[in-house]
Structure formats: C-alpha cells, structure tokens
Image: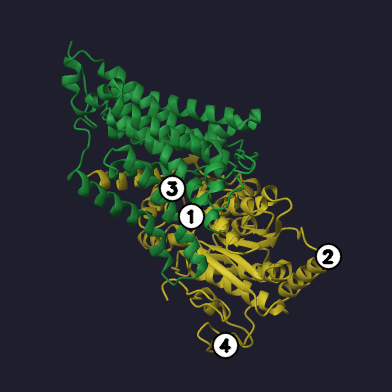
C-alpha cells in the first residue's frame, strides 16, 4: 500500500507546470519538455527555440509548454491534454515520447505532431533531429589531441542509437589521432540528475580519464572536471561558465529556425509529414567557440568542421569495423547510410566495453 | 582509488541521511509527511540563494533550514491544525515545493558559488586511506553523523523522546496522560522540515555547487523509503543510507571498469541491495514491521 502510494505520488508530482497566455483566434502551438526549462541543457535549448518562434511570429501564434513530463506512457496523457486545450501543432521534444506521440497522433488526425529524435512517423506526425554525431566527431579529434593519459571518459544517458552513434563517432575520430585511445563509458540511466552526473564524472576521473564528455543534460560533469583540473565538453548548451578553463567546445542545439519554418508552413496550410535530419550545413546545431586548446588543435577542429559542413568528410566513412571484428555493411556508398546511423546498435572496434542489452 | 570512492559515497549518502533522519522523527511522532522532496527542493534553492547573496555557506545552510521549516509549518497547519488527510497534504506540499523552487530559483539558474570547504588538519588529513575520510570532509558530513547519533539518544535515552514515541504509538493514551499531542507533533514535523531543508541545501552548497530546478531528482522519495525499510530505527537508517550511496557509486565505477553487467541492472542495484539488506535486518532482529501504530492517522483532541 505504502509503496503503491509512492509510485502514485511520483506520477502526480511529475505532472508538470502549465503556462499559457490566452487569445482567441491565434494558432495554438504546444511543446512537451522532458526536463525543467532551467536545466541549462536540452530543454533550455528547446525553450530558446520556442522563444525565437514567439519573437518571430508572436502576433499570429500562441505557445504553451508542459515541462518535466516523464517519458513513457504517462506522456500520452500530457500530449492529449495539449490537444484538448486546442493546440494544432505539437512538438514533443524527447526520444521517449515516440510511441505516446504516435498513439495520440492516430487518435487526432486533424492535429499535427512533430517528434524530436525518433523514427516513427504518421501522415500527421513528422520527425526532426540533428546530426550531432558530426559534432561528436570533431570533439573526438580534439579529445585525442588534448588527452595526456589516452583515456577519455564518456557519460551516457540511455543506450539508444543517438547516444551510441555519438560514442562511435567520437572513438572513430579519436583513433585517427591516437590508434590506442581508450574510452571509458558510464551510463547514468537518466537524462537529468546533477548529483549522479557529478558522481559519474568523479568515477571516470578517478579511473584515469582526463577528458570528460557527456550525453546527459546538466553542467555537473563540467563543474567536476573543472574542480579537478581536467578538460571537458559541454552538452546541448554553452557551459563555459561552469568551466572557464575546462570547456573545449560544446554542441549547441539551435532549434529556433526549424520551429519557425514549420510553424510558417502550418500557418500557410502547407505542413506535411516529413523527416528532417539536419547537420552542420543546415544549422540544426552549432559548435561553441573552440577554447582552452593550442592553436594547432583549434585549427584542426575548424578544418574538420569546414570539411564536414562542405560534405567532404563523413564521420562514418567506410570501412567501419564493428566490435566483433567484422566489417559493417556500407549501405551509403562510401559511408554508412542514414538508416544505419539512426538505428546504430553496435560499438565500433576499439571500445572495450559491452553495449548494454547486446 | 578506494579513498576517492569512499569520499564520493559519503557525499552521495549525506543528503539522504539528513532528510531521512528528519522524516524518521516526524513519523515516530505519528505523522506521515510525504512532502520531503518538496521541502528539500525549496531548501536547495533557498540555501543557494543565501550562500550566493552573502557568500557564506553557513548562512546558506541556515536559509535552507529555515525554508524547510517554513514549508513544514504549512503541512503542520493543514494536517495537524485542520486535520486534513496527511497523505494528500504531503503530496500537495511536494508539488508546491517544486513549483515554488522554480519560481524562486529562476534568477539563480546558471550562477555558481564556491562550494563548502573541506576540513584540513595537517598530518591527520594526510594519513593514507582513512585520513581524508575521517578528517577531510565538509561540515555537512560531520553534522549528519552528529544528527543521527543525537536523534538516537533523544528517542531512546530521554524522557522527551519516550513521550514523542508514545504520541506515535497511541495518541489517545498520550493525550489522556496529559501530553500535548498536537504540539509535540508540530515540533516533530518542524524538525523533519528543518532536516529536509538542510539536506536540500547540501546539494547546491557542497555536492554540485549550482542551482538547477529539479536538482533533488527524487532524493526526497528515496529518503522516505529508507525510513520505512529501516523500520523506523536510527541505526538501520544509517546502514540503509550509506549502503544506498555505496552501491550507487560502486555501480558507476564498475561500469567504468567494464564488468559487463547491463547498466540498466546496475542502476537498479542500489534500490535492490538496500531493500534486501534492510528487510533481512528487520527479519533477523525483531520479526515483522515496527511502524508507529498511529502513523498517518488524524488526531483531534476531545476537550
């Protein structure tokens, strides 16, 4: 009884806050956030995108957001809540909202949905994501150059393809600089828990890692690296404030232009279900300034960024050898195709660890 | 390495221990306050605000304690004064706390402070292995140990502690004997709130020195569960809190070493290990649960 009560309360507690402004005939746009808008990472950047949208089209639209919505079945209720409140275009901004979004989308064919980072679509449900692995590749190059111990520390959230492809891109890049580079991976099994992220960073540093990278949302790991005099990469957001002498660069999510484009299409009645997967070339994300590194490393990073943007360098250039020693099928000509990257569920050769669930 | 692990374990366990100690006293008086998470997060934001404004970690901790106490007074007013259902009031307190902390903290997001200093005694602190563990912690860690020892002494060695437990086991009898049940419970609730506020303040003041909404990340709920699984005994609470912290940190290290156990299982391990050990402990000793008999029941004195 007591425990079922606790479970119930956890659900209630995470129901989140609603904020809205009212106006009668404006187009209503809804957002579902997985964290608090003040997380200084993933959700914060989505909310910056929403704010850019309001600034651009504020006279024609009205936005609502629900923050702290847990992933999984409970999200369905929150998404439906936005539908019933009259929102006509709803952005669900985390991988774990995929199935709930699809379920609600099938129930309400007249409402349009946009799901971030997933792969399931419907005539009224688009997906959008960014090729962050391009940024991870650049980080891998920098990390291998800057690491003295030859051990990189990587804090993962959940072993989903987006995170796995980031790890692989990092390692492939690092191996071009130092073929014997080691990467230690710790899965936090959460997107957001500053204490746990800090503990993971401490564990990695205690085990010899001197460059920390993360795929979780808070600046805690950056701060620990800074305290211990190590180097680190930010995540989603500019985190240099938490490690002025620590941050090498950071992948900055820039959702604003995409949100504006999609809402304009909705206003014009030309919205279609699409799969958008933009990279450095389409400005779906940007790299924070390259800091705390010598000029030659900085130049190498900038050159790599230019080459990737121009399409001359592909992080998953074939041949790619999997952890099992077998060569991975090369479906995209001279590099892996998008499907292989979006569904990536293997580690490349050179990673000692085992992929959870494999 | 062992030293580093122990330090991390103590840091991870301390907020759980402080919050659970407070809740243990509250529940021993017969009141179930499910608002620990809410009081913690308000303690976190106020603690950060205090330290940021004054530059003093000590004043920050005081802010956290006061904030947690004020939150618990809301609970006392509703659940004791107006005899509202305790479960519902506690849940409402958590939801209120999370919203309130976001509101207060909006201006502090992204700011940083210098974390609490660690003790340093020449020679003693430099003793290998145990030196930093015993003589190199921050003040919160020492305080948490003193707190739980003090609570144990109070509950089992003082007359006031006996009266408090009597209120928790049979409030009608305690009332008939002339003890002011509601006043005693109010103090117990306030103590719980003060501890939760301090536990919350520990996070931005010592653990991760910045404030972010939701940074307690469910620690209040773990503290609540620890109280239940320790069968309301201070000694077992210490075992539970440190065990939970230890397994949390060790599983992170085990992942780094690459032991090949699925990380999802490893993440669940702290919960599993703590529940199993504490259940075994309580079976071995007294058999059956020792919940305060009047826990969570409403008391309206007849005059």
* Circles 2 and 4 on the same subunit: yes
| Chain painted green | B
The quadrant of the image that shows the N terminus of chain A is: top left
Residue A196: % across, % down: 50, 53
Residue A330 numbered tag: 4
Write down the chain letter for disc 2.
A
Q: Secondary structure at mark 3?
A: loop
Residue B121 or A303: which is nearer the viewer? B121
Residue B135 or A195: which is nearer the viewer? B135
Side (left or right) of A197 relative to B117: left
Q: Which residue is mark 3?
A: A86
Which residue sits at x=51%, y=64%?
A186
Side (left or right) of A323 relative to B298: right
The nearer-to-camera label among 4 and 3 is 4
* Mark 2 surroundings: few (<14), some (14-19) or many (≥20) residues within 10 A: few
* Circles 4 and 1 on the same subunit: yes
Query: Which is nearer the N-term, disc 2 or disc 4?
Result: 2
Residue A90 numbered tag: 1
Query: Which is nearer the N-term, disc 4 or disc 1?
Result: 1
**Label 4 to label 3, Cα distance in Å?**
46 Å
* Mark 1 surroundings: few (<14), some (14-19) or many (≥20) residues within 10 A: many
Query: Which is nearer the N-term, disc 3 or disc 2?
Result: 3
The nearer-to-camera label among 3 and 2 is 2
Write down the chain letter for disc 4.
A
Q: Secondary structure at mark 1?
A: strand
**Label 4 to label 1, Cα distance in Å?**
36 Å
Q: Which residue is mark 2?
A: A295
The quadrant of the image that shows the C terminus of chain A is: bottom left
**Label 2 to label 4, Cα distance in Å?**
35 Å
Residue B66 or A230: which is nearer the viewer? A230
| Chain painted yellow | A
């Amino acid at each position: 009884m007591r425990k079922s009560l606790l479970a119930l309360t956890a659900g209630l507690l995470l129901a989140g806050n609603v904020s809205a402004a009212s106006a009668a005939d404006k187009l209503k746009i809804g957002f579902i956030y997985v964290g608090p808008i003040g997380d200084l990472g993933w959700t914060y950047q989505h909310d910056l995108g929403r704010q850019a949208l309001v600034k651009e089209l504020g006279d024609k639209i009205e936005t609502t957001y629900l923050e702290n919505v847990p992933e999984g079945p409970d999200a369905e209720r929150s998404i439906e809540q936005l539908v019933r409140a009259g929102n006509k275009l709803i952005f669900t901004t985390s991988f774990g909202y995929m199935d709930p979004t699809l379920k609600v989308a099938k129930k309400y064919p007249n409402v349009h949905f946009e799901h971030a980072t997933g792969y399931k679509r419907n005539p009224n449900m688009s997906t959008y994501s960014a090729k962050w692995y391009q940024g991870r590749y650049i980080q891998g190059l920098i990390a291998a150059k800057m690491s003295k111990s030859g051990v990189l520390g990587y804090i993962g959230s959940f072993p989903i393809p987006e995170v796995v492809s980031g790890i692989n891109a990092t390692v492939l890049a690092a191996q071009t600089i130092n073929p014997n580079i080691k990467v230690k991976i710790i899965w936090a099994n959460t997107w957001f828990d500053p204490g746990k992220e800090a503990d993971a960073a401490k564990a990695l540093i205690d085990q010899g890692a001197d460059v920390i990278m993360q795929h979780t949302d808070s600046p805690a790991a950056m701060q620990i690296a800074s305290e211990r005099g190590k180097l680190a990469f930010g995540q989603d957001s500019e985190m240099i404030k938490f490690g002025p002498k620590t941050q090498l660069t950071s992948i900055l999510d820039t959702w604003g232009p995409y949100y504006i484009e999609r809402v304009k299409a909705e206003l014009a009645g030309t919205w279609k279900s699409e799969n958008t997967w933009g990279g450095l070339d389409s400005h779906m994300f940007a790299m924070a300034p390259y800091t705390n590194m010598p000029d030659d490393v900085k130049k190498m990073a900038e050159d790599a960024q230019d080459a990737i943007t121009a399409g001359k360098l592909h992080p998953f250039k074939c041949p790619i050898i999997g952890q099992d020693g077998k060569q991975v099928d090369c479906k995209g000509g001279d590099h892996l195709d998008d499907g292989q990257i979006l569904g990536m569920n293997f580690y490349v050769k050179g990673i000692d660890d085992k992929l959870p669930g494999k | 390495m062992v030293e580093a692990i122990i330090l991390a374990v103590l840091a991870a366990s301390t907020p759980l221990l402080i919050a659970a100690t407070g809740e243990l006293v509250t529940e021993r008086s017969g009141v179930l306050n499910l608002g620990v998470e809410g009081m913690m997060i308000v303690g976190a934001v106020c603690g950060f605000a205090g330290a940021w404004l004054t530059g003093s970690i000590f004043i920050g901790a005081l802010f956290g304690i006061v904030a947690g106490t004020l939150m618990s007074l809301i609970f006392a007013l509703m659940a004791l004064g107006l005899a509202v259902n305790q479960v519902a009031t506690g849940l409402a307190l958590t939801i209120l706390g999370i919203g309130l902390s976001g509101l207060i903290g909006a201006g502090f997001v992204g700011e940083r402070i210098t974390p609490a200093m660690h003790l340093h005694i020449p020679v003693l602190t430099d003793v290998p292995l145990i030196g930093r563990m015993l003589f190199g912690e921050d003040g919160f860690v020492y305080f948490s140990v003193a707190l739980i020892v003090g609570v144990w002494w109070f509950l089992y060695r003082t007359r006031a502690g006996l009266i408090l437990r009597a209120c928790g086991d049979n409030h009608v009898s305690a009332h008939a004997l002339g003890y002011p049940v509601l006043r005693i419970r109010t103090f117990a609730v306030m103590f719980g709130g003060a501890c939760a506020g301090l536990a919350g303040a520990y996070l931005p003041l010592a653990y991760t020195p910045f404030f972010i909404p939701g940074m307690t990340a469910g620690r209040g709920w773990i503290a609540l569960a620890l109280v239940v699984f320790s069968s309301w005994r201070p000694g077992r609470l210490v075992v539970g809190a440190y065990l939970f912290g230890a397994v949390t940190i060790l599983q992170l290290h085990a992942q780094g070493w690459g032991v090949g156990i699925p990380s999802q299982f490893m993440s669940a391990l702290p919960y599993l290990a703590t529940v199993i050990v504490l259940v075994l402990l309580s079976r071995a000793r007294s058999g059956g649960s020792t919940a305060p008999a009047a826990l969570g029941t409403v008391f309206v004195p007849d005059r």
